[in-house]
Amino acid sequence: MNLSNMVSDAVLAFTGIWVFWRYFQALSWYNRVLWGLFLITISMTALIGILLFAGIQGVVPLHRSLETLAGSLGVVCVIVGVWGLIQKQQITRQGFIITVSLGIGLFLVLLLNPTVGAFTPVIPSMGMVIVLLIAFLGVVRRDPRASWVVLAVMILALAIRLGQLKNLPIHPVDFYHYTLSLSLLCFGKSAQNMSWDKRSGGK
């Protein structure tokens, strides 16, 4: 049992759920669901992580599957979600279905094909680059939402990079969990002032 890792995972799980309910309720339906899939997959992974760090080894396969889900479906959803946010576009039903289908397809390929699965860590990194490029479109227009997205991505990159070091003042896993939580909060702040019509499909 690792109590500090359990606590940091609990903080991450709570942050993902809280950020979704606090900041994304003003978005149109499909935009909101895409952000929800991104945040909830992270929270689900963190919740199972609590059990894993509590010493319940039976959840290891489930935890790995959820990590893959967050790193595939979650990444695809946040890319499209950020695009809708920065471009002020309401995702259509067709766009939503294509996005989710692509994310699930990527998840299944990574999960079921060991050769392709070796590239699982690459997907989130590519996703961060794409999100950053989209955010720069907003930065050029001096959109404050874009600044929050850029900050979120930079913190996430910091979490991944420094979380691998062994000489941190706290446990590397805890550092990753807490910085990821901060990144999710920044994503939430990027949507704070949105007031789109909530009707399905943005109609």
Image (cartoon, rainbow, N blue to C red):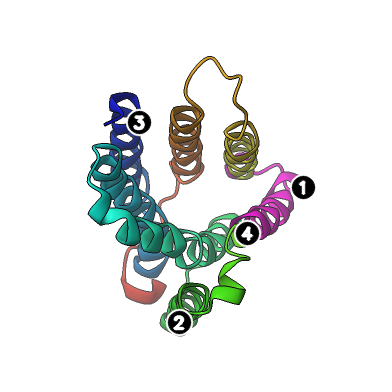
Closer mark to the observer between disc 3 and disc 1: 3
Q: Nearer the viewer, residue 67 or 197?
A: 67
Q: Residue at x 51, y 43 (%)?
A: 190
Q: Residue 189: x percent and y percent?
A: 47, 38
* Mark 4 vs mark 3, CA separation in Å: 26 Å
Give the image quarter of residue 193: top left
Mark 4 surroundings: few (<14), some (14-19) or many (≥20) residues within 10 A: many
* Mark 1 vs mark 4, CA separation in Å: 20 Å
Asked whether the beta carbons under mark 2 and mark 1 sit within 8 Å of each other, the answer is no
Label drawn at residue 5: 3
Label drawn at residue 39: none
Q: Residue at x 48, y 18 (%)?
A: 170
Disc 4 is placed on an element classified as helix
Label drawn at residue 101: 2
Question: Looking at the picture, does residue 165 appear above or below residue 152?
Answer: above
Residue type beneath disc 1 = Val
Asked whether the beta carbons under mark 3 and mark 1 sit within 8 Å of each other, the answer is no
* Mark 3 vs mark 2, CA separation in Å: 33 Å
Q: Of label 3 and label 1, which has the lower sequence position?
A: 3
Q: Residue at x 49, y 76 (%)?
A: 99
Residue type beneath disc 4 = Gly
The span picked out in magenta is: 124-145
